[in-house]
Amino acid sequence: MVAKLNQSISAKLVKDYSDRKITWEDYRSVLESASQKIQASTNENLKAYIEGFIGLVDSNKNSITSLNGQRLFEFATSF
């Protein structure tokens, strides 16, 4: 389930932002959207994962701003 979520988030970012450098704000926006959908879920592990993922994105704000689509995909699926 988590791997599928990572792939979904990464695919959306690469598709929606492939014409320009992906920013931290873009990445955060997609995660917020995923988080809202997951909150309706009863899967507590998935809820905790997405919240942790958002925290990781926030704590790596400066690194994420410099990522392009391919590196973002690698980043999102690396953990």
Image (cartoon, rainbow, N blue to C red):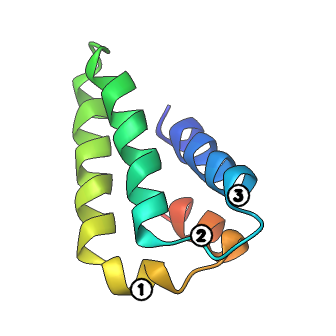
- Residue 69: quadrant of the picture: bottom right
Horizontally, residue 51 falls left or right of residue 12, namely left
Marks 2/3 in contact by CB < 8 Å: the verdict is: yes
Residue at x-position 24% and y-position 52%: 52
Q: In the figure, is residue 76 to the left or right of 68?
A: left
| Spatial CA span between label 2 and label 1 | 10 Å
The answer to whether residue 55 is above or below residue 71 is above
- Name the quadrant containing residue 39: top left
Q: Residue furthest front?
A: 20
Between disc 1 and disc 3, whose residue precedes?
3
Tell me what residue is drawn at x 50 percent, y 31 percent.
1
Callout 3, which amino acid? Val
Which residue does the image show at 49% across and 72% down from the upper left?
23
In x, y percent, where is residue 22?
58, 70
- Residue type, numbered disc 1: Ser
From the image, tell me which residue sits under label 2.
Answer: 72
In the depicted view, which residue is nearer to us: 69 or 1?
Answer: 69
SS at mark 1 in the image: helix
Residue occupied by mark 1: 63
Q: Position of residue 2 (x, y in %)?
A: 47, 39
Which class describes the residues within 10 Å of circle 2: few (<14), some (14-19), or many (20+)? many
Q: Quadrant of the C terminus?
A: bottom left
* Residue 48 vs residue 13, the one in the foreground: 13
* Amino acid type, callout 2: Leu
Residue at x 55%, y 43% (from the top left corner): 3
Residue 68's image quarter?
Answer: bottom right
Return the residue at label 3. 14
Q: Earlier in the sequence, mark 2 or mark 3?
A: 3
| Residue 46, x across and y down, in percent | 32, 32
Q: Real-space Cα distance between discs 1 and 3?
A: 17 Å
Q: Is residue 28 above or below residue 9?
A: below
